Image: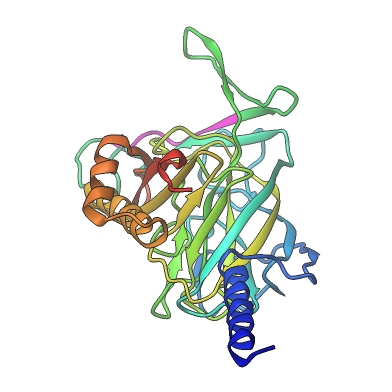
Amino acid sequence: MSRMNEQSVRAAIVALSSALIVIGVAPASAAEVRYDPGDTVYFTYCHAHPPAIRIRPGDTVITRTKDAANDVFQPTDKTVFPRLDLTRVNPQTGPFYIEGAEPGDTLVVRIDRIGLNRDWGWGASIPYFGALAPEYKTAMITDPVPDRLFIWRLDRSRMLGVLDLPNSKIGKVEVPLRPFFGTIGTAPAGKECISSLIPGPHGANMDFNEVVEGVTMSFPVFEPGALFMLGDGHAAQGDGEIDGAAIETSFDVTFTVNLIKGKKINWPRLENDRMIMSIGSTRPLIDALRIACVDLVNWLVQDHGYDKIEALQLLGQAAHLEIANVVDPQYSVACQLDKRYLPR
């Protein structure tokens, strides 16, 4: 073999190896790991939480999560208080330490399965919480909404949530169940410890109802190991979570992790069979929208060969915008684009 041919072969091997890392190919030693969290949950996303377990890129984890109230309610309860402890809401399972993850990498998580593991969930009207009620960031002299707990029956055979409405003419309603994670993400940047109620560049409480079984999510890595967590299971939720709570319940979950080394992203991203989506979180709502759309423009430029202004023109005519939440300390918006606009 000539020296030039040898160099060409070596270059091809290096390029192939890099490509395998970039697309997140699972190593041959990928494992299926079961983790029972018991009562070990966290209410912040934080660099200081000790890892629940350490896993490798390509590994699949089978675990479970508690509901947003830390499983304190019973189906016979009628009110949120006094059972609800506001210092212990949105409990997160994890964190999962991904070997080899370093700041500046991208963590890729595929949600393989979401399983409803009980036959009821709860919704609520919560005083001083919700998009249509006086809340802590909006001073009003009107009365808060009344404290009321709604217990939804989860008909898993028909995948419907059923709620009796004794004070309404209709008497009972049924809504389709579409289980998803309201809160999911990595440890934030800057050695901050941030409440699991607050979404941001690290993900967390985005309450985006497309985080369903089968999707693939990407998150920035800000800390060694990424320290991935998830929780806040929703059996169903309308856009925006305007009443402050979805149909809250616990889940069994299976997910698979992977890693893109050396690829830096700034905000969470989501991909399903049809769409790519960027998710931005802040207040006011218009700035969350801007963050999401700018990130999607950057995604098209950096990964799909678009000119920036031409990408913006495309989004101007073809983007779908979805309000994920308008109740959390930061609001969340998703900017979405059909995959038919991606070059092959």
Q: Nearer the viewer, residue 188 or 120?
A: 188
* Residue 247 location (% of width, % of height): 56, 36
Snapshot quadrant of residue 303: bottom left
What's the coloring here?
A: rainbow
x, y (%) of residue 60?
A: 73, 61
Magenta range is 143-151
Q: From the viewer's perspective, is 282 left or right of 126?
A: left
Q: Nearer the viewer, residue 2 or 344?
A: 2
Q: Position of residue 159 (x, y in %)?
A: 67, 26
Tell me which residue sits at (58%, 67%) in the image.
228
Quadrant hosting residue 229: bottom right
Count of numbered marks: 0
Was residue 150 drawn as part of the magenta stretch in this picture? yes
Residue 197 among magenta residues? no
Which residue is farthest bottom? 3
Q: Nearer the viewer, residue 230 or 135?
A: 230
Measuring from the top left, give residue 300's x and y in whole percent.
Answer: 36, 54
Q: Is residue 25 above or below residue 115?
A: below
On the question of residue 343 being in view, the answer is: yes
Residue at left offset 38%, top offset 36%: 242
Query: Along the line of sight, which residue is nearer the eye, 274 or 229?
Result: 274
- The quarter in which the N terminus is drawn is bottom right
Q: Residue at x 62, y 69 (%)?
A: 20
Visible residue check, residue 38: no
Q: Residue furthest front?
A: 2
Q: Who's the residue at 79% across and 70% down the image?
A: 28
Q: Is residue 337 above or below residue 172?
A: below
Residue 230 drawn above or below residue 21: above
Drawn side of residue 308 relative to residue 19, left or right: left
